[in-house]
Image (cartoon, helix red, strand yellow):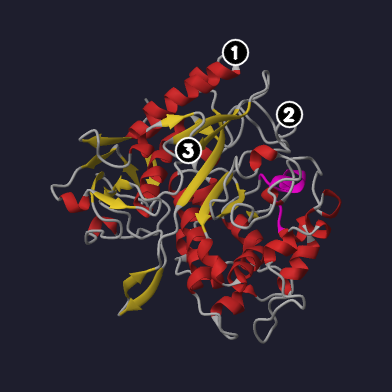
Amino acid sequence: MLSKILLGTSLLASPVNAAWIRDGDAPPMSPVHKHVSSLSQRTWLPTATVSSSSSLHERSEKHPDGHQRKTCLLDPPPPTKLSMCIDKQGGVCVKEAEWLNVSFEIEMYALESNTELKEKGLEPNDALKKGMAQFKAEILGSVTRDPPDSCNDALFDVHSDDDEHSWMWELEKHEIDKPYMMEASSPQAMTQNETEIAITQTSKLQNGFSKYPSGYTDKSNPWEKDPPGLHVHVASKCLLQDVKRIVAVLLIWERFDSAIYKLTGSTLHEGEAGLKAAPISEKSPKLLAHLLSYITKDGWSSPSDDEALGDYLNKPAVSSRSNMHGDKEDADGFRRFEVNVCHLLHVKCAHDLPEKEAPQVPKFGALEFRGFDPIIGEPLRLIIMLVVRLVQFGCNSPLTDDGLLHKLAYWDGENEAEEVKPLFDALDIPFESFHKKLFTEAKFAKRPKDQPNKEE
């Protein structure tokens, strides 16, 4: 079994268990939850427990999909909410933004110490089975349930072809004699409480997996130009209330993306490797110019033709292979933007890849943020907080000409923001929480000892 995981104090404090509770009704914080800013201070996260409440009213809630799902929350709760506060009185939050359901995918490699998955000559099918069994026992099993039916079952089961009712474990790349790249996909459409539990479970991955393949330098890594990543889906149908809202979110991300990636130590998707998660400016300068036409220095505007954004994206002049930058392969297309809109808008995801289109992949109404390096635990929680709050901000901010949404979205399309503080202030995210070392010095993000830098 994997050992206990060392996390920043801003995630959870020891001891930890979980109890039935209505989503959003966290008990008062005790002194143990106070934020500790010093990087040198850490706390151990022991195995978490989910227990049932005596109150039947608190044992389940009806979700938008119409199903009753058991509700549980880590206890003690995290010191801050993932969701954004949209009404404070006297410094106390009295109203949170409506939660936007989340799912995420983490791609990774097995470490040399993970002997089960590093056997010489291990066949792909055997690697899939062993990895899935290990994931269920050691990762999902790191949060126990008492009684056994406590909490949503999807958080505690895994399959190779179903992320609707469970976690999903796949081999993303499985060529023999090359490092197997594995992917863990969370259950779909998780509530805030479920997202917190899923993040806690991922913390255990650090002892058996890494974002780097063991035994390879950068030059010898066969997947250097197609690296692993983190993909976070955020339910974003609320942005469709007004096209200016989705335009604003896309422009804000485009403006602040480089500063965000620098702060979070995301470096894998640079150069040729950036083809799989490219900014709009690189993928389609024509599209960026169109988005910028919705906003002026003095306020919001509208393109002269005033057509639906989805209709504009479907024009061959924007979406065709010849007019969209990239590798031009069948799998290329809108799905390879840093912020992928193809699950939200009725546009083709790929140039010619039917298995990535509806009805095989329904339009489930989410934006997909896919430019980050794979990450787990506390850093993953911060990234999810950032992207969820950004979409909540886009959905809830006034569309006034002098409003904060307008001010953050307006720019010239060339000079990107050099620092993230204006955005973090708007999203009510403490800048000091995003210590770069928290991302770059995490065990999961460090190069294995057997893998030197390309300069070495």
Location of residue 139 with respect to 284 vertically, above or below: above
Instruction: Residue 345: tell me if it is visible.
Output: yes
Residue furthest to the left: 54
Residue furthest to the right: 322
Nearer to us in this view, 391 or 239: 239
Secondary element at tag 2: loop
The quadrant holding residue 165 is: top left
**What residue did someone put label 2 on?**
220
Which residue is depicted at the point 74% across and 66% down? 288
Location of residue 124 with respect to 449 vertically, above or below: above
* Mark sitting earlier along the chain (2/3): 3
Real-space Cα distance between discs 3 and 1?
Answer: 30 Å
Q: Amino acid at mark 2?
A: Ser
**Mark seen at residue 202:** none
**What residue did someone put label 1 on?**
120
The 10 Å Cα crowd at callout 2, few under 14, some 14 to 19, many 20 or more, is few
Secondary element at tag 1: loop
Which x, y percent locates residue 316?
82, 56
* Mark sitting earlier along the chain (3/1): 1
| Screen quadrant of the N terminus | top left
Secondary element at tag 3: loop
**What residue did someone put label 3 on?**
163
What range is drawn magenta here?
A: 268-279
Q: Is residue 393 magenta?
A: no
Q: Is residue 277 magenta?
A: yes
Q: Amino acid at mark 1?
A: Lys
